[in-house]
Image (cartoon, rainbow, N blue to C red):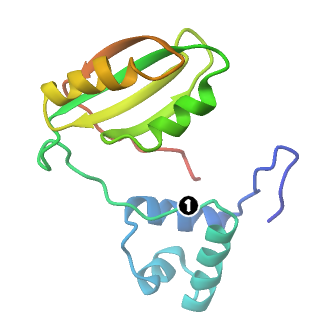
Amino acid sequence: MGIDTSGAVNLDEVDKRIIRELAADGRMSIRALADKTHISRSHAYARLARLQELGIIESFTARIAHDRAGFGASAYVALEIQQDSWKGIAAHLRTMSYVEHYALLGGDVDVLVLVRAPDNRILRNLVLEQFQGLAGVRSTKTWLIFEDAIGPGPDWT
């Protein structure tokens, strides 16, 4: 396993099998991971530790049914920002309740934010008061999410 000129780690087939299995079930035991990837438990421990050390596996999370957990109002919110304000806006978004994900983009939209809120009243406050009140935000555009799902992700073959 080496690192290419872009800084990406070149993953071998064992690394890819480990990632594929953990992406499907991050709670599996090392024994199960070793069995499914056809390596020894000690090898699975070592590979997993290395993938974490390299920052390829950042964390283990649970997939949440947001509506069942009380977050029934979801939306993507596009922020048009002043070009020199990204760092300050990102610092605020990092600490704001109900912000699940955000990204700086190239193209027609500057920043895209995924919001999960308990209801439309809180969602409205988040967009009209909190986002529009951030220094550097010029305007917002909101798309309500009626239904969403998680796709298969990258092809680790």
Per the image, the residue denoted by label 1 is 58
Question: Residue 104 location in percent, x, y?
Answer: 57, 27
Picture residue at 22% right of the left edge, 27% below the top: 123
SS at circle 1: loop
Question: Residue 59 location in percent, x, y?
Answer: 49, 63
> Residue 150, relative to residue 26: is it above or below?
above
> Residue 35, relative to residue 93: is it above or below?
below
Q: Mark 1: few, some, or many residues within 10 Å (few <14, many ≥20)?
A: few
Picture residue at 40% right of the left edge, 67% below the top: 26
Q: How many circles with numbers are drawn on the protein? A: 1
Quarter occupied by the N terminus: bottom right
> Residue 56, relative to residue 65: is it above or below?
below
Picture residue at 11% right of the left edge, 47% below the top: 68
Question: Residue 2 location in percent, x, y?
Answer: 83, 62
> Residue 58, relative to residue 107: is it above or below?
below
For this view, does 156 lie left or right of residue 131?
A: right
Relative depth, front residue between 52 and 113? 113
For this view, does 121 lie left or right of residue 83?
A: left
To which quarter of the image does residue 124 belong?
Answer: top left
Q: Amino acid at mark 1?
A: Glu
Question: Residue 101 location in percent, x, y?
Answer: 43, 38
Relative depth, front residue between 105 and 79? 79
To which quarter of the image does residue 142 belong?
Answer: top left
Relative depth, front residue between 137 and 22? 137
